[in-house]
Image (cartoon, rainbow, N blue to C red):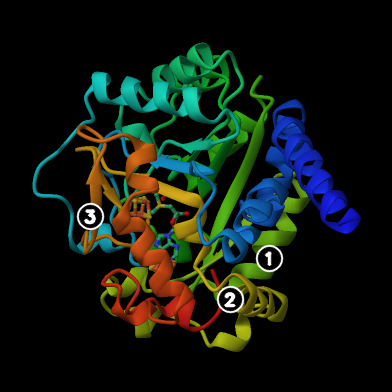
Amino acid sequence: MLNKRLLKTFMSVSRYLSENLYIVFNEKINNYIISARFRWILFFKRELEYPIKKKPHPFPSIIQIQTINTCNASCKMCPYATNPPKETKRMSDELFEKIIKEIIKESKSTFIFLYLQNEPLMDNDIFKKIKLIKRLSEETISTGLFTNGSLFTDKKIKELISSGNNVLIVSLDAFTQKTFNKIRKGLNFNHIVANVNKIKNSKYSKTLAVEFTVQKDNIKEFKQFIRFWKKQHVPVVVNYISNRSGDLKDFDEMSIPLPNIPFFRRWGVKVYKKIIKCCPAVLSTFNILSNGDVILCCNDYSKKLILGNVNTSSIKEIWNGPKYQKIREMFYNGEYRKIPTCRYCYNWKNNFL
Ligand SMILES: C[S@@+](CC[C@H](N)C(=O)[O-])C[C@H]1O[C@@H](n2cnc3c(N)ncnc32)[C@H](O)[C@@H]1O
Ligand code: SF4
Ligand code: SF4
């Protein structure tokens, strides 16, 4: 009896602390996010509750929003390059505001990433949108961007600084120009490195990192890349090439042998799978396309599964709705191969995310 009461008190105190500490130590946690690949304590704690309650946290921890569906590059390992959208679609300002207002109402600890299968700076108003999030949420909501870094100008850097954005990650994937040209097609290595340095030396005081997706063409440069950027005091986000839920053609030619993926990373996912039995992507992250459609996973470039549309339903309705719940149950029952998005997911099968 006493034990039960103690456990209950502990759970509610820890819930209160984690929800509120997150907001107070926003910046510190953002830096931690970089090293822990977005799986920080609060979110992990929420995921841990899944096997007990058989329900996710009532609102997503991370929301990715595609404000425009285009990109100015065609990277070798990105399905966007072989299958770009037929029409440009920009999210309407009304829909964007509707989404943001719901997030603010439901959960101030939700982290918003303003990119999804696109290049976020193709949206001219991207920093205005971040500013809007900051204004409406009274600075309580954190935002982040992954970008190819090519579209920064002095004006855009000023906009970035005044937007209040918390995390900026510039994807480089190479240490040398030669390797960069092989992978990041349509982009200019020196221009992007110069942009990273400009941002670093500007008044931008929030988190700036560079990203490296390890693949066959760049694996030899990995250590040099880490050493170089560490010396520059710029954190590195390390990512391993995935088959994008089966959507990446020629994946086998670009992939790396599994032993190259650090043991702790694969071991961690193995333990996670045993305890939680559900992919963290479906317990934490909500992905909204520019037309309002919601996809299960950012890996699903061919949109194999649409869970709803935020024009006609709320985020909360879709997140807790029967379609999403059914998918989580299928994971829990070991039937992930029946889920169209996940059936061919190389990452889940091989225990790395
Ligand atoms: C899809 S991009 C979108 C944002 C932006 N366009 C960019 O390149 O950073 C986000 C990240 O995914 C990485 N990426 C691309 N293809 C990948 C793949 N097949 N497996 C894993 N990561 C990949 C990119 O290197 C980039 O860091
Ligand atoms: S990785 Fe990013 S920059 Fe490259 S094609 Fe995909 S979306 Fe565009
Ligand atoms: S199993 Fe793979 S495709 Fe499915 S949600 Fe997880 S990461 Fe995405």
Residue at the image position 55 percent from the left and 14 percent from the top = 162
Residue at the image position 84 percent from the left and 49 percent from the top = 5
Q: Amino acid at mark 3?
A: Ile
- Mark with earlier residue (2, 3): 2
Of all residues, the one furthest to the left in this rendering is: 86
Q: Secondary structure at mark 1?
A: helix
Q: Secondary structure at mark 3?
A: strand
According to the picture, the residue beneath numbered tag 2 turns out to be 273
The answer for how far apart the CA atoms under marks 2 and 3 are is: 24 Å
Marks 2/1 in contact by CB < 8 Å: the verdict is no
According to the picture, the residue beneath numbered tag 1 turns out to be 224
According to the picture, the residue beneath numbered tag 3 turns out to be 306
Left or right? Give the position of 156 relative to 252: right
Q: Is residue 107 above or below residue 190?
A: above
For the question of whether residue 188 can be seen, the reply is no
The quadrant of the rendering that contains the N terminus is bottom right
Residue at the image position 49 percent from the left and 45 percent from the top = 190
Front residue of this view, candidates 183 and 29:
29
Residue 308 in picture, x, y percent from top left: 23, 47
Q: Amino acid at mark 1?
A: Gln
Quadrant for residue 24, please give it.
top right
Front residue of this view, candidates 265 and 312:
312
Q: Tag count in the figure? A: 3
The quadrant of the rendered image in which ligand 3 is seen is bottom left
Left or right? Give the position of 259 relative to 87: right
Residue 229 in picture, x, y percent from top left: 70, 51
Q: Amino acid at mark 2?
A: Lys
